[in-house]
Amino acid sequence: MPVAEKAPLTTDVTIKVPRSLLGEIRKRYGKRVRLVEPDAEKSISIYESAWFKRVSAELTPGRALRAYRENRGLSRAEVAARLGPAARKTHVADMEAGRRGISKDMAKKLAAILNAPVARFL
């Protein structure tokens, strides 16, 4: 899911990389890459991070719908067509904008279409 956010420039990024890829990374980025062993005492799960908690609190069901839809490469019209003959792309747009609520039944349909948890749309 593409996200644009202003953030301070960071020079240290910690990621888990299979050792088989380290050679390729070093070729491309040279001495700017350094291998360090993770410090279990300082590491936290992304789900415990302040960033994740802030983003999750701001992610409304409508915004989640848009994010999942775009991530799957589907247009509003395509989602509406999969929802059934009564649905229109304006219905999907209204749900994304928060102008139209998402019922439990609709959340179940969206979850099946977008391969996402039902709770994400409630």
Image: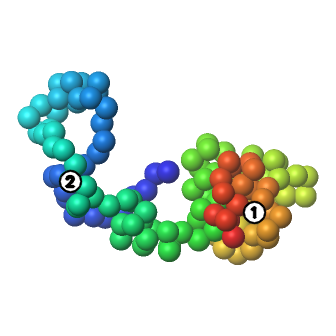
Few, some or many C-alpha atoms within 10 Å of disc 2 (few <14, some 14-19, many ≥20)?
A: few
Q: Which label sits on residue 42?
A: none
What residue is shown at x 50% (from left), y 74% (from top)? 57
- Taking the image as shown, residue 73 lies to the left or right of residue 24, namely right
Q: Nearer the viewer, residue 79 or 52?
A: 52
- Taking the image as shown, residue 107 lies to the left or right of residue 35, namely right
Question: Under tag 2, what secondary structure?
Answer: loop
Farthest residue, direction left: 31
- What residue is pinned by disc 2? 39
- What residue is pinned by disc 1? 107
Q: Nearer the viewer, residue 22 or 79?
A: 22
What residue is shown at x 36% (from left), y 66% (from top)? 49
Farthest residue, direction right: 85
At which x and y percent is residue 85?
91, 52
83 to 28, vertically: above or below: below
Few, some or many C-alpha atoms within 10 Å of disc 1 (few <14, some 14-19, many ≥20)?
A: many
3 to 23, vertically: above or below: below
For badge 2, the amino acid type reads Asp
The numbered mark, 1 or 2, whose residue comes first in the sequence reads 2
- Examine the rendering and report whether any part of residue 99 can be seen: yes
| Res. 104 image quadrant | bottom right
Q: CA distance from mark 1 to mark 2?
A: 40 Å
- Taking the image as shown, residue 71 lies to the left or right of residue 46, namely right
Q: Nearer the viewer, residue 98 or 47?
A: 47
- Taking the image as shown, residue 79 lies to the left or right of residue 66, namely right
At which x and y percent is residue 116?
65, 53
Question: Under tag 1, what secondary structure?
Answer: helix
What residue is shown at x 23% (from left), y 61% (from top)? 42
For badge 1, the amino acid type reads Ala
What residue is shown at x 16% (from left), y 33% (from top)? 29
